[in-house]
Amino acid sequence: MTREVLGWWLATRVGLFLLSISAPLLFNRGTEYPDVWRAWVQWDVWHLKALAEFGYNNGEPSQAPLAAFFPGFPLLVHLVHFTGVGYFGAGIVVSAVASAVAGVYLARLAQYEFPELKGLGPNAAVVWYGAPVGVFLAAGYTEALFCAFAFPAWLAARQGRWARAAIFVALAATVRVSGIFLACALVVEFVTSKKRDWPSAPWLLLPAIPVLGFMAYLKQIHGSWFAWQEAQEKGWAREFTWPWDSLIHTWDAASRGHFAGERSDWTWMFRAELVTLVIGLLLLAWLLWRRSWGEAAWVAATVGAFCTSFWIYSLTRATLLWWPLWIGLAVVVHRHRWLGRFYLCLAIPLAAIWAAGFFTGRWSG
């Protein structure tokens, strides 16, 4: 199974590499020959690279408040860059290795949940690698690394190995704020699991250590325990907003456009965010129907966080973290082959469009 998953990982990486070369050439509107090798250097890649290079105490070298980003990914990028690949290259290397690890554990988790469906594991990895927003598993973003910790964490939790699960969740909590939601979901899973082991309960506190440590570090630098949240509000308009107001703002941006600029037509991405919101709510309903309480708590917390910002945006990327979605799709594909063909007919062109948008500097989630 591992070899098959890694084969699909390699095939999809090659496809994305070809897109990264061709998209800037095909969609170049300028008079100068585009630098195709810098197609990977877009959006948050700049901020994460700046953080890896300069740290948290050197202003805003990428013109954004860097306290918004958790330290796990930039720290690894900083270490890998010493091999000589540079900061941007190091980000791609970290994501490449992490996406391979995450795909293997997603396959194992899927097979563990549905042992009667032979071959389900690789199918789950395929639909995940081929996701419309799959480009963010290859670019120097945090999604792949987070999943490389989150997927084995949940597999361990389902097996009743709570200490191992808590250690992986703690690692995930160094990468993204989503780790806090994952820690809460782990508690729900523990309380509702038939495999709960009360002597192991103190392990569930472990993920709080890196989060509190990061907050204390930012307190020393910026004078606030919640400097990361304040940075999110300053740089990305993620101040608390009632969900109905957030939905109104998103609908307005999706229907009329909100941003002026030459690099993007923002309306299509906000429309994608609304579609993703519907998918998230349907997924949540399915998990509640299955009484998968821990996974339902995970999806609900993620959706809730995005729906309480000024706009709902980047929820499309967050779908990569929803392992129940990709395992559920794999089950549907396994049981109904025609739906699998239908999914691929939609996912492949969407993935190409998303990747082309990213590689040409357009906002793509």
Image: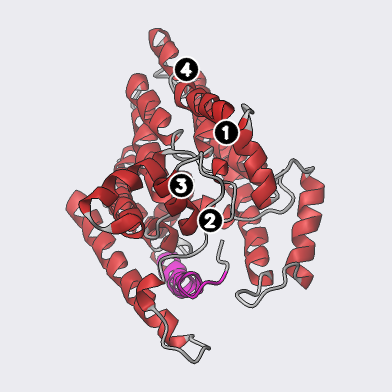
Name which residue type carries label 1.
Ala
**Pointer 4 residue:** 205
Q: Return the x and y of residue 81 as percentages of the image width and height.
A: 28, 51
How far is mark 3 from mark 2, CA to CA?
9 Å
Q: Secondary structure at mark 1?
A: helix
Q: Are marks 3 and 2 in contact (CB under 8 Å)?
A: yes
On whether residue 220 falls in the magenta region, the answer is: no
The quarter in which the C terminus is drawn is bottom right
Q: Secondary structure at mark 4?
A: helix
Which residues fall within the magenta stretch?
339-362
The residue depicted at 59 percent of the width and 52 percent of the height is 64
Which tag, 3 or 2, sits closer to the chain's start? Answer: 3
Which tag, 2 or 4, sits closer to the chain's start? Answer: 2
**Pointer 2 residue:** 62
- Residue 297 is tagged as 1
How far is mark 2 from mark 1, CA to CA?
35 Å
* Left or right position of 98 against 358: left
Q: How many marks?
A: 4
Which tag, 3 or 4, sits closer to the chain's start? Answer: 3
Name which residue type carries label 3.
Leu
The residue depicted at 31 percent of the width and 48 percent of the height is 98
